[in-house]
Amino acid sequence: MPTAASPARTASALAGRMSAVNEMTRLLRLLFEVEREFVRTAPTLVYRVGEPELKYLVCQHVWESAGHARFLRERGRELTTFGSNETVRDPIRRIFSETVGRNDEDPLMILAGFYEVLKPALLAAYRHYLKVTDPLADWPSKKLVEEFIADEERHQREVAPYLGGGDAREWKLHLTQALDDMGGWLGHETRLPLAATYVWQHEATPYTHPATCNRGKYPVCSGVFGLDPAEDPIVRPWLTDPKTDARVIRLMVYVWLMMEMDAIDYLSTVFLETPAAPFDLHYDLARHLWDESRHSQFGFRQLPKLGVDLMTVEHSLDLYNILVHLPPHERYAMMTMEFEANSFPTKATVMDRVRELNDFEADTLLAFDRNDEQNHVRYGHRWLPEIMALFDEKRPPEEFVKATKEKFYRYAEIYGGKVPHSLPRERRLTGEKILKLAGV
Ligand SMILES: [Fe+2]
Ligand SMILES: [Fe+2]
C-alpha cells in the first residue's frame, strides 16, 4: 500500500487546508498595492494645485497612506502567501497612472479623480475586507483595517472643502470604468469589462511635470534670499549679524520656513518617476515630504500672527523651476546633500538668537525643524545610492554629488531668475518692512 502522498497532492492539500488564510492574504496584498500606488502618484497633485492648505493636506494623506501600506506589508509578512516582493500588478498600476492625467489639465479635476473615485473605492474595499474576514481568527488585520477605515473617512471629510471646483464628471466616469473593469480594487464587485473603444490616455500621452509649480492666488518671484533690504525679505547677512534685532530674525526665519513649500513642490516630483523604487524608499520620501509640509506650515501659520499679510509675501519658484530640468536622482541629491546638509550652521545661529525672545513656540518649531532636517540628511545617505542605481548611475556618490552641484548651478543660470516679481517693492514684504513689523 502506498504510504506517502505524491508531492502534487501534498501541495494541493496544503493550499486547501490554508485557503481561508490565503484568501484574506490575497486581499491584503491588493490593498497594499493600492496604497503604495497612491503614494507613488498622488504627490503629482502637490505642485499642480495652487492652494497651500491643499498641498499640505495631500502631503499628510500621502504620509498616512504610506503608513497604511507599511502596516499591511508587516501583517502580510506574517502570512506565507503575501509574497516577498513589493511590485504592483499592472491592472492596478495603470489605473493610478491614468488618474495622474496630463499636466495641462485642471488640477481640481485630477484631485476629483483621486478623491471621488479611487479613494472611495479603497474605503469600500476596506469595508468589504472587514465584512468577509473572521473577526477573531484574523483580529490582527481587522484592527488595522478598522483604523484605516477611520482614516479614509477622515480624508474624505478633510478634502471635501476643495472638491466640486471644476467639471470632473466625464473624467470621473472615465476612471470609474477602468475600476469597474477590475470589479473594484478587490474584484469583489460585478466586473464590467471595458469597451473596446476605451482609450488609456496616459499610454497615448505620457505624463511630464509642468515647467513651473502652482501657487494659486499668491504673489510669486524667483527667490527670497538677497542682500538688498529694499528688495528682498530675507537679507542674508542680517541672519548672522549679531546687531540684528532678534524679532527681525524670527520674522525672516518664518519666511524661510514658509518657503519650504519649494521643497514640497519639487520633492513631490520624485515619486512618480521611481516606479521601481523599494517601498521603503517611497516611505521615507513620504515622511520627508510631510515633514517639509509641516515646516512650511510653521511659517504660513506664524507670519499672520506677527502682523504679516500673506498676500504680500512672494513665493519663490526658482528651485522647482531649475530642479524640474534635472532627473529625479539629481533632484534628490541636491536636496539632501546640498540644500539640507548645508543649512545647519546658519539655522543654529538663528535658533540661538530667537531664544533671546523667550518665545517658546518659536523655539519649539525650530527645534523640531532641526531634528527633522537631521533625519532628512540621514535619508539622503541611506537612499542616494539606491536612487542612483535606479537611473543606472555608476559613479561613486561623492563624485556624482559634486558633478550634480556643478550641473545645478549651470542650470540655475539658464532656468533661474526668470520669474518676475508679482508685486512692486512698495507692496511686497521686504527686509525694510520686516524692520517696521518687528518694531525696530
Ligand atoms: Fe524642512
Ligand atoms: Fe528637509
Image (tube, grey):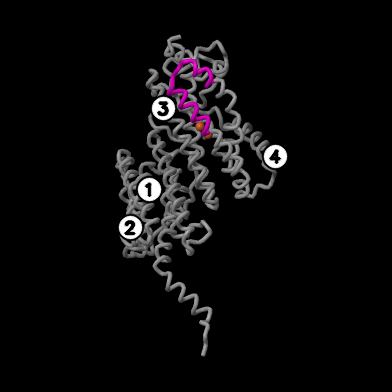
Q: Residues within 10 Å of mark 4 (few under 14, many from 20)?
A: few
User: Is the residue indicated by label 1 positioned so its CB lies within 8 Å of ligand 2?
Assistant: no
Residue at the location (35% across, 55% down)? 126
Indicate the position of residue 350 as horizontal and vertical percent values.
53, 20
For badge 4, the amino acid type reads Glu
Q: Residue furthest top?
A: 440
Classify 340 as above or below 182.
above
Look at mark 1 in the image and give the residue it sits on: 114
- The span picked out in magenta is 350-372
- Mark-to-mark CA distance, 4 and 2: 51 Å
Q: Amino acid at mark 1?
A: Phe
- Distance between mark 1 and mark 2 Cα atoms: 23 Å
> Residue 371 lies in magenta, yes or no?
yes
Q: Mark 1 and mark 4 in contact (Cβ < 8 Å)?
A: no
Q: How packed is label 3: few (under 14 Cα within 10 Å), some, or many (20 or more)?
A: many
Q: Earlier in the sequence, mark 4 or mark 3?
A: 3
User: Does the Cβ of the disc 2 residue fall within 8 Å of ligand 2?
Assistant: no
Tag in front: 2 or 3: 2
In the rendered structure, which amino acid carries the disc numbered 2? Leu
Q: Is residue 274 left or right of residue 198?
A: right
- Distance from label 3 to label 1 (Cα)? 26 Å
Cβ atoms at labels 2 and 3 below 8 Å apart: no
Question: Which residue is denoted by mark 4 in the rendering?
Answer: 399
- C-alpha gap between disc 2 and disc 3: 40 Å
Q: Above or below — where is 144 with respect to 431?
A: below
List the residue tagged with mark 3: 300
State yes or no: discs 4 and 2 in contact (Cβ < 8 Å).
no
Residue that mark 2 sits on: 130
